[in-house]
Amino acid sequence: MDPAETFHVLSFLDDRVRLLWAFSLLAHAQTLSQDVQRAICGYFGESFPRKLVAVFAENLRILDLADGTMQCTKPKIDFEMGCFLYPISERIVVCMGGRETSGVASLDVFAQVVTPLRPMLSVRSFPGVVKVADLLYIFGGEAGGDLVESEVYSLGRRPSRALPNMQHPRSMFSPCVYAGDILLPGGSPVIESFHIQTETYTILSVSFPFPGIASVSVIVGDELLSLCLLNHVGKWKLGSSGDFEVGFIDKIASGAMVYSSSPAVLHSSKLYFADVTGNFTIYDLCSNSLSSQRRDFL
């Protein structure tokens, strides 16, 4: 399907169906050509990811996925280590939560300007967050213990509102959008699926292999792939009755370690994500190896 055909098909779909169908397609990003991905992203006002941003203490780092170069600056910001960093566009990152705070702020990574936004409904660190259109779905997190409370946060003018509680508390995980559902793997041995339209939860038949351990998850083709702090990777075929296949990740780079709840970006058969030190970890799906992009703190 070329970009023109993509627009033609999308134009005949109802708004909500269009939205859910598009995110289902984006969940299978590596099976689509980059031209088609860009066409879908452009139609829905999304940015095709080319850069990753990380903030650690007062250090700002930007990794260019095309050439692997990293920019490091020290803008006048002071986010807590417990905050969650979510890329909204090529330019804007939203930082939310932290120790004893429900605060939310947007960071313009080019102008290096921080703008306070309205707070979340609950205090939380390291929640699971996923963006759908102009909404951030925020699940769980930590505040003296893992939370079940969840909410939907509007980046527009609509007020935030509480969502039904998850059935199992969890934190330090990354949700994945798939075919109109938000999968919640990590933080618990039980994987829940949140249906966006009905706002109900379903328990999946498969157990998560790394409960209680910080993990990064992403959907690659028809598989849910999860990396954990212990440098293991689990792969589960979506919807199957089988269990996760778990293997050890060959650690070839000094200091590379999975420890983040930030969303991973798939680019050229590699997963890129910001780790807890404010640097970047890279998982090569083909070689099953970790590497890192690191710079000394400024």
Image (tube, rainbow, N blue to C red):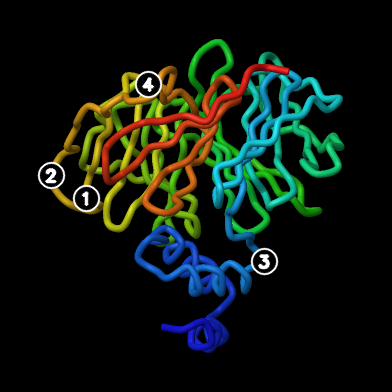
Instruction: Say which residue appears at 40% left-offset and 56% top-offset.
Output: 178
Q: Nearer the viewer, mark 1 or mark 4?
A: 4
Residue 265 is situated, as x and y percent measured from the top left of the image, at 49, 47
Q: Nearer the viewer, mark 2 or mark 3?
A: 3
Name the amino acid, label 2: Gly
| Label pair 1/2, CB-CB below 8 angstroms | yes
Q: How far, Cα to Cα, is label 1 from label 2?
A: 8 Å
Using the image, determine if residue 174 lies above or below residue 9: above
Using the image, determine if residue 244 lies above or below residue 142: below
Residue at image mark 1: 237
Residue 22 is situated, as x and y percent measured from the top left of the image, at 49, 68
Q: How far, Cα to Cα, is label 1 from label 3?
A: 30 Å
In the picture provided, is 31 more to the left or to the right than 124?
A: left
**Precedes in sequence: disc 4 or disc 3:** 3
* Number of residues whose C-alpha sits closer than 10 Å to that of mark 1, classed few (under 14), some (14–19) or many (20 or more): some
**Precedes in sequence: disc 1 or disc 4:** 4
* Number of residues whose C-alpha sits closer than 10 Å to that of mark 3, classed few (under 14), some (14–19) or many (20 or more): few
